[in-house]
Amino acid sequence: MNRNLESVLRFVNLTTSGLLAGSLGFGEAALVPGWKEELPHDESRRALDALRELDYFNAIGPLALGTAVTLAVASSGVNPMRRLLDAAAAVALAGVVGSTIMITVPINRELENHPRADYPSDSAQSLTRNWSRAHAVRTSLGVGAFFCAVASSVAGKK
């Protein structure tokens, strides 16, 4: 791979994985496909209507994953540690995107279908615990992917 192209890919990977990790820990949106489904559909979220209209937010997670996979596979003549860090970032980002699409979004849909009650049911509490665990895992994976991207960017050439 061309050195300039690799530099651009590393910059995009570092930026998007940082945005993704930050959004998981501190933001209102997870910046991966399906994040809109994690928000309640009641009237209290009118302030986020403008964000819901911006579909490019859905591209940040897959873009981070795509650049990490490209760096892990297509980088030639790089330090083996750098390649390992790129692969670890790609695996972690795949975990973030996959857990959002396959775990947290379906749990949110199921929670929304539960009838409102004065006291939460056992199944709703169980779903909430499962969502919290899945979110903690995907946040850890996102932060880990960002740290791997940073370490890979500062690792020596050979």
Image (cartoon, rainbow, N blue to C red):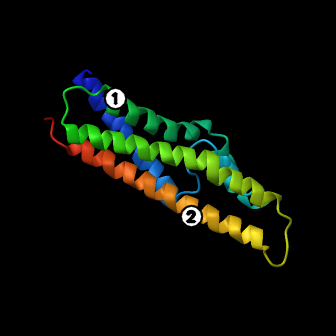
Residue 89, label in figure: none
Label 2 element class: helix
Q: Is residue 107 left or right of residue 83?
A: right
Give the position of the C terminus as an image quadrant. top left
Return the disc, 2 or 1, that comes first in the chain's sequence: 1
Residue tagged 2:
133
Residue 59 x/y as whole percent: 54, 36
Q: Which quadrant of the view contains residue 14?
A: top left
Q: How many marks?
A: 2
Residue 21 x/y as whole percent: 45, 52
Q: Is residue 14 visible?
A: no
Residue type, label 1: Val
As drawn, the residue found furthest toward the left would be: 158
Q: CA distance from mark 2 to mark 1?
A: 31 Å
Q: Is residue 63 left or right of residue 68?
A: right
As drawn, the residue found furthest toward the top would be: 2
Residue type, label 2: Arg
Q: Residue at 76% across / 68% down in the picture? A: 123
Q: Residue at 19% across / 43% down in the picture? A: 155
Check contact, mark 2 vs mark 1: CB within 8 A: no
Residue 73, label in figure: 1
Q: Is residue 119 visible?
A: yes
Give the position of the N terminus as an image quadrant. top left
Residue 17 x/y as whole percent: 41, 45
Q: Residue at 63% across / 68% down in the picture? A: 129
Residue 81 x/y as whole percent: 22, 42
Does residue 72 sit above or below 46 in this rendering?
above
Q: Is residue 134 left or right of residue 18?
A: right
Q: Nearer the viewer, residue 21 or 157?
A: 157
Label 2 neighbour load within 10 Å: few <14, some 14-19, many 20+: few
Does residue 71 sit above or below 18 in this rendering?
above
